[in-house]
Image (tube, helix red, strand yellow):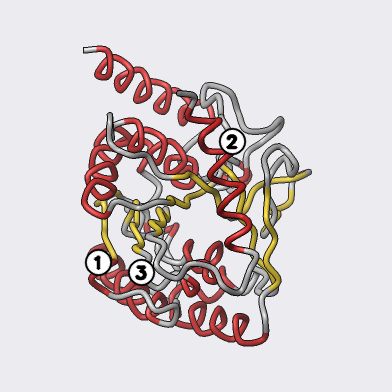
Amino acid sequence: MNWQADQERAWEELSRCLQTSSSEQSLNVLLLAAHPDDETIGASLLLARFPKSSVVFLTDGAPRDRNLWSPAINGSREDYANTRRQEAIRATSFAGVSPQNIFWLGGVDQEAAFEISLLAERFSKAMADTSPVMVVTHAYEGGHPDHDAAAVVARMGISLLGSRSKPLLLEMTSYHAREGRCVTGEFLGSGSSPELCFELSQTDQQRKRNMIQAYASQRLVLENFPIHEERLRLAPEYDFSEPPHEGKLWYECMNWPMTGSRWRELATTALSEIQEHSCR
């Protein structure tokens, strides 16, 4: 059967569910976030609506390069990672996520592209253990190399499930470049895939504020993100050997260590490896 066609049928059913107040609270949702705070930026409402949700963090949120750290942080990289971990536990608790439903795949911030195959294997195991009906992750938009790695890891992890039932794959918004500036709260190439926009109520917005405030180490970054609405869309098919858009990617604009060409080389190598594995 065509997985993409199955995805579209499942999306139609889910979108009706999500847009009604009687949405099924027992849906098992698994959210793959590149870093602690990405779940708050993109899917605070979804997590609160489905309290049985689990959150999987691709990386620990602590780069090796101190120049990329929050100015509020002192100590070792391990100290920084622990700070991000504790912030994540507190933030997601406002959405009703239990600490027992938070998982860490072990990647290092800014370096997930170097371990895509390993992270995909770990994510596939997390899905096998939790049996989600829906996975939510980042779009391939060139905003952050780890966001883009999460998009690949989600697809590879689902592929590694083999004959097991495969979850619906959705995307949340993060950020990306548009004409040299950073765009938040919108998808790149809006209209390329079915999309839902949720207006957050005053209660929802206060919850999101509480979650954002829990990430004290990231205060300067998070103050730039909107809190009045969130968007989800059915994950489109991507060609990861091609850039997500023309011109410089946002992480290239920021002069971070990774380049788009290097990222695509790492991603396509990992995808080739999994294709070889599936053919054995």
| Res 59 label | none
First in sequence, mark 2 or 3: give its number. 3
What residue is drawn where x is 27% and y is 41%? 124
Which residue was labeled with disc 3? 52
201 to 56, vertically: above or below: below
Q: Quadrant of residue 33?
A: bottom left
First in sequence, mark 3 or 1: give its number. 3
**Residue 162 image offset from top left, x and y in percent:** 28, 29
Which residue was labeled with disc 1? 76
Image quadrant holding the C terminus, namely top left
Image quadrant holding the N terminus, namely top left
Spatial CA span between label 1 and label 2: 39 Å
Instruction: Name the mark nearer the viewer: 2 or 3.
Output: 3
**Residue 158 image offset from top left, x and y in percent:** 35, 37
Q: Nearer the viewer, residue 106 or 151?
A: 151
Q: Nearer the viewer, residue 209 or 83?
A: 209
Which residue was labeled with disc 2? 236
Q: Nearer the viewer, residue 122 or 21?
A: 21
Q: Quadrant of residue 66?
A: bottom left
- Marks 2/3 in contact by CB < 8 Å: the verdict is no
**Residue 94 image offset from top left, x and y in percent:** 43, 82
Q: Residues within 10 Å of mark 1 (few under 14, many from 20)?
A: few
Spatial CA span between label 2 and label 3: 26 Å
Amino acid type shown at disc 2? Pro
Secondary structure of the residue carrying tag 3 is loop
